[in-house]
Image (cartoon, rainbow, N blue to C red):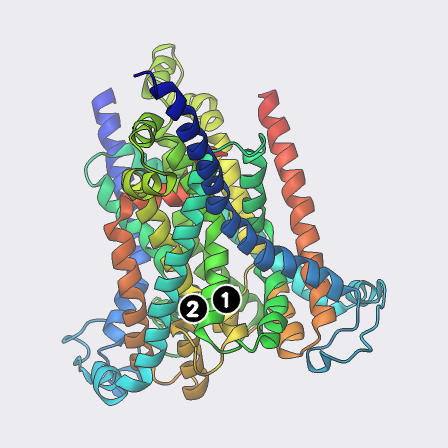
């Protein structure tokens, strides 16, 4: 017993030294990987956006700094503005549709008990399918103009077949339909989780106090699900701004440039065309828009909800 | 109308809405299944909807895929399997260790900032990375290799895993770990023998989600690979551009083979997956 206190402190400190070692061994690999594979590309792209770097000239020592030339080219480039407009139109089309479908289906789901788990599991399905397959199945096959089932059904009701992939407007609608098919589930599951967080007795109490169904919904449910709804919307808005894969498979950006998104334009100029400098400036433009938008969105929603 | 009747009407409307949306989700899946059993004749004149009623199903697309052209399909399939499993495993080990460390150790009071730093990656558009990756992996001589995809996909999955797992580990009682350490276990033992088994549901969720992410990824694969290391999504679009949307049945069969494993895994683990998917927003 008498020797115990003497051994113990040294054992203890050796443990602490080793434990302190583990503290860093656990964290450093993750930080290192993220720094190398995320921070380096972000900084490199920033550098590239201010040069005349081209994929087929890498290794040349006469890569020049061109200042803001790429960004000036970008702002005066009508083709780029076209893709920016397409991207915004796409976002404005899909996000509200997903919100409405998400809320309707989530309310229905929250309203039932039998079969709820089954529906929830089934609604997860589209989120597991790759965008390439979704675009192929839903898009290429269902919207096929001659023998696709959608036009076939329209014709059997006496309508004209819709030129889904050859008309600029309808091609955009088809793309939106694909995105809504796939991502409404995300809104459904998020909003269901939000609705299940609303205490049922609060609703009951409001009804007892004489509020009708609609009043109880607007005054109690809506404010309580607002925070999650706002976050879910932000996630979907950012994702919609980044849309590219379904477009590549369904329309390739066409007809003409009618459905080309910003990300597709970056791929086309930077990877296909090799113009890394111009591609990088477009990528940074997209990032800056996302950051300004995301920041403003967070500030505004926080403020709006703080006032409530 | 009494309260009970009102409630019954609401329930009926709810089931109608759910049935309608389920049908919208089901129809494309039904369509790809029946198309994989169709013959050229069934798709040349008009749309056909019901097997045995308006067309005779045949197995030729499946025979084509699994007998005639098996080797041709097997390479991208194996690439997808290897890339998805290895990248998710690497990301799981590195990401959950970091998540554990951020839950249990103090990094000068900056733990939250470190986690936020990891998550800021979500804001960056993928387009920002593909150009740099193209140059980076070209310089390293890793273009068109599985290694390049494994590196990119693991680094892409790590931030999400760190974020979710840190929260998960924080929810576990610290006392068990402490008593194990008093009994002489070190941190590594504690992490792998005590914390990880307790965190199994979280680990399963993030593992399957990163698996699905890697399995379905297209843009990076399109940028970095072109022949040897192509994954299934890329293989599919290459087939389409070669045959020019004529062999619908073969494409349908390939789609099904690529979709069924991940959809089955995701739906079987529904509870964990939904938790992992909605996690971010529920915390925010």
Disc count in the image?
A: 2
On the image, which quarter does residue B200 sit in?
A: top left
Q: What element does badge 1 sit on?
A: helix
Subunit that carries the residue with mark 1 = A
Q: Position of residue B277 (x, y in %)?
A: 40, 45
Q: Which residue is mark 1?
A: A245
Q: Nearer the viewer, residue A117 or B232?
A: B232
Q: Position of residue B92 (x, y in %)?
A: 39, 52
Q: Is A76 positioned to the left or the right of B81 in the image?
A: right
Q: Is residue B120 visible?
A: yes
Residue B182, above or below A202? below
Q: What element does badge 2 sit on?
A: helix
- CB of mark 2 within 8 Å of CB of mark 1? yes
Q: Residue at x 40, y 55 (%)?
A: B210
The outermost residue toward the front is: A2
Q: Nearer the viewer, residue A39 or B280?
A: A39
Within 10 Å of the Cα at label 2, are there few (<14), some (14-19), or many (20+) other Cα atoms? many
Q: Are marks 2 and 1 on the same chain?
A: yes
Q: Which mark is residue A3?
A: none
Q: Which mark is residue A132?
A: 2
Q: Nearer the viewer, residue B181 or B256?
A: B181
Q: Residue at x 63, y 43 (%)?
A: A294
On the image, which quarter does residue B9 sit in?
A: top left
The outermost residue toward the left is: B52
Residue B37, above or below A69? below
Q: Nearer the viewer, residue A169 or A73?
A: A73
Residue B22, above or below A7? below
Q: Is residue A188 visible?
A: no
Q: Position of residue B25 (x, y in %)?
A: 32, 56
Q: Residue at x 53, y 37 (%)?
A: A230
Subunit that carries the residue with mark 2 = A
Q: Is B268 positioned to the left or the right of A288 in the image?
A: left
């Amino acid at each position: 017993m008498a020797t115990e206190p003497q051994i113990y402190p040294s054992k203890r400190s050796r443990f602490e030294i080793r434990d302190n070692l583990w503290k860093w061994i656990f964290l450093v690999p993750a930080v290192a990987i993220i720094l190398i594979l995320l921070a380096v590309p972000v900084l490199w792209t920033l550098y590239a956006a201010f040069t005349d770097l081209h994929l087929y000239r890498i290794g040349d020592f006469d890569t020049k700094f061109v200042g803001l030339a790429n960004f000036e080219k970008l702002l005066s480039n009508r083709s780029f503005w076209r893709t920016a407009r397409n991207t915004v139109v796409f976002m404005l089309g899909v996000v509200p549709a997903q919100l409405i479908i998400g809320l309707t289906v989530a309310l229905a789901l929250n309203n039932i008990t039998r079969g709820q788990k089954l529906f929830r599991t089934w609604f997860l399905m589209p989120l597991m399918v790759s965008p390439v397959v979704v675009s192929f199945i839903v898009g290429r096959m269902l919207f096929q103009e001659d023998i696709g089932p959608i036009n076939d059904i329209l014709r059997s009701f006496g309508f004209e077949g819709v030129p889904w992939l050859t008309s600029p407007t309808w091609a955009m609608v088809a793309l939106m339909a694909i995105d809504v098919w796939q991502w409404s589930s995300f809104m459904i599951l998020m909003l269901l989780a939000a609705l299940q967080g609303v205490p049922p007795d609060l609703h009951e109490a409001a009804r007892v106090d004489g509020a009708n169904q609609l009043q109880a919904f607007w005054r109690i449910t809506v404010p309580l699900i607002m925070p999650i709804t706002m976050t879910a919307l932000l996630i979907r808005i950012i994702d919609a701004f980044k849309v590219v894969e379904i477009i590549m498979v369904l329309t390739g950006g066409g007809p003409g440039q009618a459905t080309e998104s910003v990300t597709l334009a970056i791929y086309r100029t930077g990877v296909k065309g090799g113009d890394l400098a111009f591609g990088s400036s477009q990528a940074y433009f997209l990032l800056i828009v996302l950051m300004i938008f995301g920041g403003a969105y967070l500030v505004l929603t926080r403020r709006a909800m703080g006032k409530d | 109308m009494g309260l009970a009747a009102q409630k019954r009407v609401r329930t009926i409307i709810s089931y109608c809405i759910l049935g309608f949306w389920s049908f919208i989700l089901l129809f494309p899946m039904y369509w790809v299944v029946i198309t994989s059993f169709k013959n050229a004749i069934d798709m040349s004149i008009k749309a056909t909807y019901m097997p045995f009623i308006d067309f005779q199903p045949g197995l030729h697309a499946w025979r084509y895929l699994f007998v005639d052209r098996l080797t041709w399909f097997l390479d991208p399939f194996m690439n997808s399997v290897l890339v998805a499993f290895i990248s998710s495993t690497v990301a799981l080990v590195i990401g959950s260790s970091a998540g554990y460390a951020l839950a249990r150790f103090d990094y000068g009071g900056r733990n939250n900032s470190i986690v936020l730093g990891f998550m800021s990656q979500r804001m960056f558009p993928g387009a920002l990375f593909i150009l740099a990756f193209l140059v980076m992996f070209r310089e390293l001589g890793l273009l068109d290799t599985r290694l390049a995809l494994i590196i990119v996909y693991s680094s892409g999955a790590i931030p999400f895993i760190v974020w979710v797992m840190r929260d998960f580990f924080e929810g576990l009682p610290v006392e068990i770990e402490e008593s194990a350490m008093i009994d002489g276990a070190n941190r590594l033992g504690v992490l792998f023998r005590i914390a990880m088994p307790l965190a199994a549901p979280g680990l399963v969720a993030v593992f399957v989600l990163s698996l699905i992410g890697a399995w379905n990824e297209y843009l990076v694969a399109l940028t970095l690979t072109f022949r040897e290391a192509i994954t299934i999504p890329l293989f599919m679009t290459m087939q389409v551009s070669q045959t020019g949307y004529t062999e619908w049945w073969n494409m349908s069969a390939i789609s099904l083979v690529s979709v069924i494993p991940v959809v089955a895994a995701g739906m079987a683990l529904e509870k964990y997956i939904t938790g992992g998917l909605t996690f971010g927003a529920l915390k925010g």
